[in-house]
């Protein structure tokens, strides 16, 4: 098929233990407000909700490498949100929780960077969140660890350091919707596909970063994510 211009490259993530095999990305879904204490720190914004970001914002972070995240324009409060990311090998509509469990390929660690000042202002105006949430080159995700190689998603530590300061320190047990419940609830609105990734929410302790900051985040048994703000 002739194209008018070169089509964009397929966005991918690496897979732990696979040298020449890539996970091709379809969509990136996000559950907001899925940890009660984070909901409180924002000022009780309500029930867990869903938004999407384009996958061309993804920065793949293979083991041993550091993601360079450019400090974006149009914000003075750019904030980190460490999240457990679930990657799907199958999809469907209206999945049951059992079907959702079977669709999981593996897990990764990601950071849902946010222009928080805009986020608060847009919410105040009941405007769309994209200017706050969709930031070019600001969606770092580790290599995916296959589900066979990850622990049960039960009481796993989820944390983030800026320099030597521990900012976020939670457990996956604090999630309001469990991972399979998140997948099932999204599939009521969209047909999920193999290649979809879902960010499952952030624990309390989100906060600002600045140019030069070095960040380290992780989920126990899943991976660690190294980042630098440039
Ligand atoms: Mn988030």
Image (cartoon, rainbow, N blue to C red):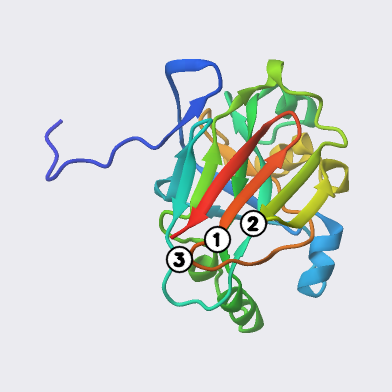
Q: Nearer the viewer, residue 183 or 176?
A: 176
- In this rendering, the label closer to the viewer, 1 or 3: 1
The residue indicated by pointer 3 is 71
Task: Please indicate whether residue 38 sits to the left or right of residue 122 in the image.
Answer: right
- Return the residue found at the far front: 164
Quarter of the image with the C terminus is: bottom left
Q: Residue at x 70, y 46 (%)?
A: 200
Label whose residue precedes the other's in the sequence (2 or 1):
2
Task: Please indicate whether residue 64 sits to the left or right of residue 43 in the image.
Answer: left
- In this rendering, the label closer to the viewer, 3 or 2: 2
50 lies above or below 116:
above
> Residue 171, percent across and down?
84, 44
Q: Residue at x 48, y 70 (%)?
A: 131
> Residue 193, percent across and down?
53, 32
Circle 2/circle 1 CB separation < 8 Å = yes
The residue indicated by pointer 2 is 163
The residue indicated by pointer 1 is 213
Label whose residue precedes the other's in the sequence (3 or 2):
3
Question: Spatial distance from mark 1 to mark 3, Cα to Cα?
Answer: 10 Å
């Amino acid at each position: 098929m002739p194209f008018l211009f070169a089509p964009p490259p397929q966005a991918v993530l690496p897979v732990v233990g696979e040298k020449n095999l890539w996970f091709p990305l379809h969509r990136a879904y996000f559950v907001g407000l899925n940890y009660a204490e984070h909901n409180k720190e924002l000022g009780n914004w309500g029930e867990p909700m869903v938004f999407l970001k384009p996958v061309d914002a993804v920065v793949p972070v293979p083991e041993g490498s550091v993601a360079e995240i450019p400090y974006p324009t149009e914000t003075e409060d750019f904030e980190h949100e460490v999240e457990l990311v679930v990657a799907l090998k199958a999809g469907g509509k209206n999945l049951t929780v059992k079907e959702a469990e079977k669709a999981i390929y593996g897990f990764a660690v990601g950071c849902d960077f946010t222009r928080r000042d805009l986020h608060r202002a847009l919410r105040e105006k009941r405007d769309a969140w994209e200017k706050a949430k969709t930031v070019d080159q600001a969606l770092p995700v580790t290599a995916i660890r296959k589900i066979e190689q990850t622990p049960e998603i039960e009481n796993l530590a989820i944390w983030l350091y800026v320099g030597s300061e521990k900012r976020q320190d939670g457990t996956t047990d604090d999630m309001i919707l469990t991972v399979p419940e998140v997948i099932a609830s999204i599939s009521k609105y969209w047909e999920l596909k193999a290649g979809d990734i879902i960010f499952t929410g952030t624990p309390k302790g989100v906060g600002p970063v600045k140019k030069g900051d070095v960040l380290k985040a992780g989920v126990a048994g899943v991976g660690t994510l190294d980042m630098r703000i440039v």
